[in-house]
Image (cartoon, helix red, strand yellow):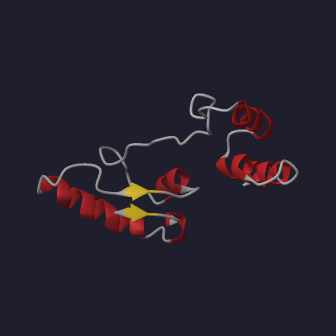
Amino acid sequence: MILDVIHRMPALFETLRGVIDRGHRKEKGKGRFLVFGPASIGLLSQTGETSAGRVTYIELRTLTAQQIAGERAARERLWLRGGFPDPYLEDSDADSPALQRDFIRT
């Protein structure tokens, strides 16, 4: 199950904890939930819920030169626009800096 924008429903963490714990007792395995959201880690600590034994954190990083295969123009675009996906994929170089600033601010 994929849960996105989870910071809009902080009470969901308590329910999720119970579902995960019941699943462990029934040997349903790990990795049944993917939780996304800009504030997921901070929100989890604010709820008072412990994530010990229930959570693995995966850091999503920017695009790298090794991931950009092939043509020189693609590598140059990565150098000029940075590795955040939206600025990198923008149609023009002129629009990319505004997207980069907005992304970094948020």
Q: Nearer the viewer, residue 86 or 6?
A: 86
In percent of the image, x 48 and y 67: which residue is there?
A: 10
Relative horizontal placement of residue 42, taking residue 17 as reference (left or right): right
In percent of the image, x 46 and y 60: which residue is there?
A: 47
70 is higher (above) or lower (below) than 27: above
103 is higher (above) or lower (below) than 19: above
Residue 2 position within the rendered picture, expressed as x and y whole percent measured from the top left: 39, 62
Q: Count the marks: how many?
A: 0
Relative horizontal placement of residue 88, taking residue 58 as reference (left or right): right
Residue located farthest toward the front when viewing the structure as drawn: 71
Hey, which quadrant is residue 95 in on the image? bottom right
Q: Nearer the viewer, residue 1 or 40?
A: 1
Residue 12 position within the rendered picture, expressed as x and y whole percent measured from the top left: 40, 69
80 is higher (above) or lower (below) than 20: above
13 is higher (above) or lower (below) than 86: below
Residue 34 position within the rendered picture, expressed as x and y whole percent measured from the top left: 39, 55
Residue located farthest toward the left when viewing the structure as drawn: 26
**Which quadrant, please, contains the C terminus?**
bottom right
Q: Nearer the viewer, residue 101 or 20?
A: 101
Relative horizontal placement of residue 23, taking residue 103 as reference (left or right): left
In percent of the image, x 88 and y 51: which residue is there?
A: 94
In percent of the image, x 80 and y 36: which residue is there?
A: 80
